Image: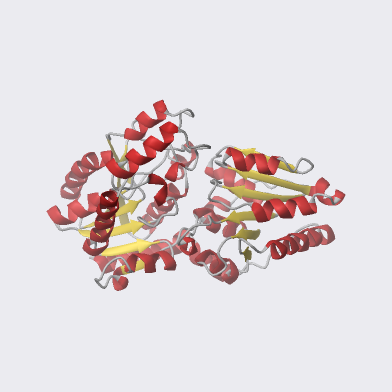
């Protein structure tokens, strides 16, 4: 079997969509006669904001994994912060910005470029060189965030001249929370230089949406469009098999994932306030959030006292799938920020696989809106379209009252394009082109 080295900071028992992308692809690469070898950080020293030990059970025993030491400055932040937590991307799990947070963001933005997990690089680089020589590996894939991981690939390309594929799951200098770090002009220039160098020196680039691809292409005068490919986030059909189904859930709406102050909720709040006077709606409606939700957002929803709205902490991946399948409607919110047209959050594709109607708030001309429409999965509403959003919610509830369920119009042939099995075949083709 052809051997490919994958360098990823996030790996089980870390939780989150970024972990699942390469966990699943590794499993399916084996089915395509490619042996994945993974280098990651030792979980005992890692600064993971989330843990999901159930993901360890989803990894094929035939995937070879090496774990290394790391120097993690975020573990110091955890000890100093009031919440005693590792910050999520952009510190989105912080409910307020106190002195410690402000100082930490400035230090993060100007002394740890491109990010605070760069302390892993020297350990991962040393192990990567050992593994490449021991296994005679020709192709290396680096996946980010953290984007500091891409610098490992850059160094391996310089020193060993391997075939290097850079998988960038998120924008780099255009991520929606980038300005939160108060970069100096010098720090911005250095970050932009590193981003440009990675884009130009890699043999192939993978990203998750057409919009993000075009943004990366615009970063350099070199022609990189022909070596830049889109493999979106996706879903594993195996995760949706044999899930127990509950009865009499009512008109239940579910949201999974992060909900920070960058996520606009006014359309949802206004619609619920408008509909909450209906006694049938009060009795049948439930809204459940699973994941990290900002305290101020929780307070706004909880102010609608006559509706059943609950917030739960992060749950295992398997439980998250169960919650999706045991719902009637799924809520998707895209941050209201610059360049948000290319945001394709991992949960969107599991929403599609669950085949429940998606009610989405975000850019109506963005990549997510296009996919939802192509898959017949629901509807995206602009941040200011209060009337349209309310009318759609009323329409769905009327259908539920009449038929006891929301009828699915999902287009299976479109949804299957986002299965991990299909995406692994795309990845195999890219590996072949990079050789």
Residue 281 visible, this angle: yes
User: Is 410 placed left or right of 176 in the picture?
Assistant: right
Q: Quadrant of the C terminus?
A: bottom left
Which picture quadrant has residue 402? bottom right
In percent of the image, x 41 and y 31: which residue is there? 100
Q: Residue at x 70, y 40 (%)?
A: 302
Q: Nearer the viewer, residue 294 or 205?
A: 294
Q: Residue at 75% x, 61% y: name it.
A: 396
Give x and y (percent) for residue 324.
Answer: 63, 50
Q: Residue at x 38, y 61 (%)?
A: 207
Residue 236 image offset from top left, x and y in percent: 50, 55
- Residue 387: image quadrant is bottom right
Residue 269 percent coordinates (x, y):
69, 50
Q: Nearer the viewer, residue 107 or 305?
A: 107
User: Image quadrant for the N terminus?
Assistant: bottom left
Q: Residue lying furthest right in this view?
A: 279
Q: Is residue 184 above or below residue 202?
A: above
Q: How is the image coloured?
A: secondary structure
| Side (left or right) of 211 relative to 123 | right
Q: Looking at the picture, does residue 326 appear above or below residue 100?
A: below
- Looking at the image, residue 163 sits to the left or right of residue 350; the answer is left
The correct choice, above or below, for 295 with respect to 172 in the image is above
Q: In terms of image quadrants, where is residue 316?
A: top right
């Amino acid at each position: 079997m052809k051997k490919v080295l994958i360098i990823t900071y996030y790996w089980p028992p870390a939780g989150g969509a970024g972990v699942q992308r390469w966990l699943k692809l590794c499993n399916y690469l084996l089915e395509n006669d490619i042996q994945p070898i993974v280098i990651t950080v030792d979980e005992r020293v890692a600064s993971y904001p989330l843990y999901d030990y159930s993901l360890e059970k989803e990894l094929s025993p035939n995937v070879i994994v090496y774990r290394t030491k790391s120097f993690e400055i975020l573990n110091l932040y955890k000890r100093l912060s009031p919440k005693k937590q590792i910050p999520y991307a952009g510190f989105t799990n912080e409910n307020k910005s106190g002195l410690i947070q402000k100082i930490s963001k400035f230090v993060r933005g100007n002394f740890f470029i491109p990010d605070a997990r760069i302390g892993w690089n020297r350990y991962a680089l040393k192990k990567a060189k050992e593994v490449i020589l021991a296994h005679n590996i020709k192709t290396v894939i680096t996946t980010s965030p953290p984007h500091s991981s891409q610098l490992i690939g850059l160094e391996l390309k310089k020193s060993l001249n391997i075939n290097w594929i850079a998988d960038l799951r998120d924008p780099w200098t255009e991520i929606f929370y980038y300005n939160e770090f108060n970069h100096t002009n010098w720090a911005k220039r250095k970050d932009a230089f590193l981003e440009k160098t990675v884009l130009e020196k890699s043999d192939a680039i993978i990203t998750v949406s057409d919009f993000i691809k075009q943004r990366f292409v615009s970063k350099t005068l070199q022609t990189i469009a022909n070596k830049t490919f889109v493999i979106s986030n996706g879903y594993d059909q195996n995760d949706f098999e044999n899930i127990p189904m509950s009865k009499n859930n009512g008109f239940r709406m579910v949201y999974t994932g992060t909900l920070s102050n960058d996520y606009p909720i006014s359309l949802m709040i206004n619609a619920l306030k408008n509909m909450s006077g209906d006694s049938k709606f009060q009795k049948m409606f439930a809204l459940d959030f699973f994941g990290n939700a900002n305290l101020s957002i929780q307070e706004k929803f909880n102010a609608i006292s006559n509706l059943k709205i609950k917030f739960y902490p992060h749950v295992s991946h398997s439980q998250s799938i169960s919650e999706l399948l045991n719902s009637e409607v799924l809520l998707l919110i895209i941050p209201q920020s610059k360049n948000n047209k290319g945001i394709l959050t991992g949960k969107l594709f599991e929403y599609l696989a669950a085949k429940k109607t998606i009610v989405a708030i975000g850019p109506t001309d963005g990549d997510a809106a296009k996919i939802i429409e192509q898959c017949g999965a629901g509807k995206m509403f602009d941040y200011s379209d209060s009337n349209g959003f309310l009318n759609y919610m009323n329409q769905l509830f009327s259908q539920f009252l009449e038929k006891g369920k929301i009828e699915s119009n999902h287009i299976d042939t479109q949804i299957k394009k986002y299965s991990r099995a299909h995406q692994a075949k795309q990845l195999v083709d890219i590996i072949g082109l990079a050789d």
